[in-house]
């Protein structure tokens, strides 16, 4: 389980960068950002699979295709459109912290899974996490730009909440599917996941880029756009998803939800670097509370495993 926790941390470090890209590429629509990222993801996955592709596709069952399609939609395409809109209209910090509530939702939805710590024992660390999320949200509203549109901010918050729901469902469904279907390694599943998302992105590309020469065209540098999306595809999608799949096999489902908080912590760190200022007092309090909540949860799951009550699934070699 220790290796699973480490892989969850590394996945969070990779995923945290996706909150900065929509702010950096603000001249592009959320759909363009999403399709660009996942077209690059699909292309890289295709190259990585290379000569193994035919043999790997031959092993796919109908249930695998259905799982890949629903995960590509919920965990990638719909999720990132909503997240990008949230970042561009509500900001990096509120969006990352709303999405950071995934552990609370996942823990509640996965409380009946094998290896889950009883909810009454999880209540205290979850309250600590909730206090951290409250701190960052208070800080966000205290430092909102004076010229910000209330409607736009509300829409951003609503979209960030939609991203939260998408990712909560995906995290549970993906973890359960990997545990019940150990026929694919984490790397193979991540590559297939990338291919599925890339194919769906091809279908959306005409819609996404139909206004590529529109009013905002002068502010768009397509070389920078594709370079950033290639980096996101390689770092967040290929490397990050591989680490996450390893973590999903090795830790209980409810702890999987807690590990998603590492994404939030790294997003906050990168956000501070991007704005060129250190974290404010309430942001520091939020970070401390989130780390404490995760550490507490890990300890509870570790104690349960020591008593033989969990059985992590090992990845096939």
Image (cartoon, rainbow, N blue to C red):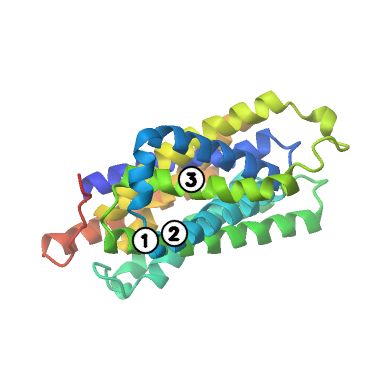
**213 and 78: which one is in front?**
213
In three-dimensional space, the C-alpha distance between marks 3 and 2, rounded to whole angstroms, equals 11 Å
Residue topped by disc 1: 61
Residue 101 seen from this side: no
Residue 195's disc is 3
Q: Which is nearer the N-term, disc 3 or disc 2? A: 2
Residue topped by disc 2: 65
Q: What element carries label 2?
A: helix
Residue 12 % position (x, y): 42, 43
Residue 174's disc is none
Q: Do the residues labelled 1 and 3 touch (CB within 8 Å)?
A: no
Q: Residue at x 34, y 42 (%)?
A: 187
In three-dimensional space, the C-alpha distance between marks 2 and 1, rounded to whole angstroms, equals 7 Å
Task: Please determine whether, in this image, residue 69 is positioned above or below residue 15.
Answer: below
Q: Is residue 110 left or right of residue 72?
A: left
In which image quadrant can residue 171 be found? bottom left
Q: Is residue 38 left or right of residue 207?
A: left
Which residue ends up furthest to the right in the rendered image?
Answer: 215
Q: Is mark 1 on a helix, strand or loop?
A: loop
Q: Do the residues labelled 2 and 1 touch (CB within 8 Å)?
A: yes
Q: Is mark 3 on a helix, strand or loop?
A: helix
In which image quadrant can residue 18 be found? top right
Say few, some or many: other residues with alpha carbon within 10 Å of mark 3 (under 14 / 14 to 19 / 20 or more): many
Residue 156 % position (x, y): 70, 55
Q: Which is nearer the N-term, disc 1 or disc 3? A: 1
Residue 303 seen from this side: yes
Q: Nearer the viewer, mark 1 or mark 3?
A: 1
Task: Please determine whether, in this image, residue 96 is positioned above or below residue 226.
Answer: below
Q: Quadrant of the C terminus?
A: top left
**311 and 183: which one is in front?**
183
Q: Residue at x 11, y 65 (%)?
A: 308
Say few, some or many: other residues with alpha carbon within 10 Å of mark 1 (under 14 / 14 to 19 / 20 or more): few
């Amino acid at each position: 389980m220790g290796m699973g926790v480490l892989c969850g941390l590394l996945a969070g470090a990779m995923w945290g960068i996706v909150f900065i890209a929509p702010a950096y590429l603000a001249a592009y629509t959320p759909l363009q950002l999403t399709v660009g990222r996942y077209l690059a993801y699909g292309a890289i996955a295709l190259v990585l699979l290379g000569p193994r592709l035919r043999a790997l596709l031959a092993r796919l069952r109908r249930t695998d295709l259905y799982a890949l399609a629903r995960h590509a939609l919920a965990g990638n395409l719909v999720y990132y459109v909503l997240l990008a809109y949230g970042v561009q209209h509500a900001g990096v910090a509120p969006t990352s912290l709303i999405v950071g509530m995934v552990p609370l939702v996942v823990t509640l939805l996965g409380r009946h899974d094998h290896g889950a710590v009883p909810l009454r024992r999880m209540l205290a660390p979850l309250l600590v996490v909730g206090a951290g999320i409250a701190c960052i949200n208070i800080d966000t509203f205290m430092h909102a730009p004076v010229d910000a549109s209330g409607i736009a901010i509300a829409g951003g918050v609503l979209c960030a909440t939609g991203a939260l729901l998408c990712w909560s469902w995906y995290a549970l469904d993906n973890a359960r599917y990997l545990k019940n279907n150990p026929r694919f390694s984490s790397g193979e599943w991540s590559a297939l996941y990338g291919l599925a998302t890339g194919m769906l992105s091809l279908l959306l590309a005409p819609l996404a880029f139909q206004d590529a020469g529109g009013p905002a065209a002068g502010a768009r540098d397509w070389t920078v756009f594709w370079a950033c999306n290639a980096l996101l595809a390689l770092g967040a999608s290929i490397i990050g998803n591989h680490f996450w799949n390893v973590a999903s096999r090795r830790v209980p489902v409810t702890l999987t939800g807690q590990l998603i908080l590492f994404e939030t912590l790294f997003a906050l760190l990168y956000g501070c670097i991007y704005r060129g200022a250190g974290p404010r007092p309430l942001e520091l309090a939020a970070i401390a509370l989130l780390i404490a909540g995760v550490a507490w949860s890990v300890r509870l799951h570790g104690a349960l495993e020591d008593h033989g009550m969990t059985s992590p699934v090992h990845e096939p070699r």
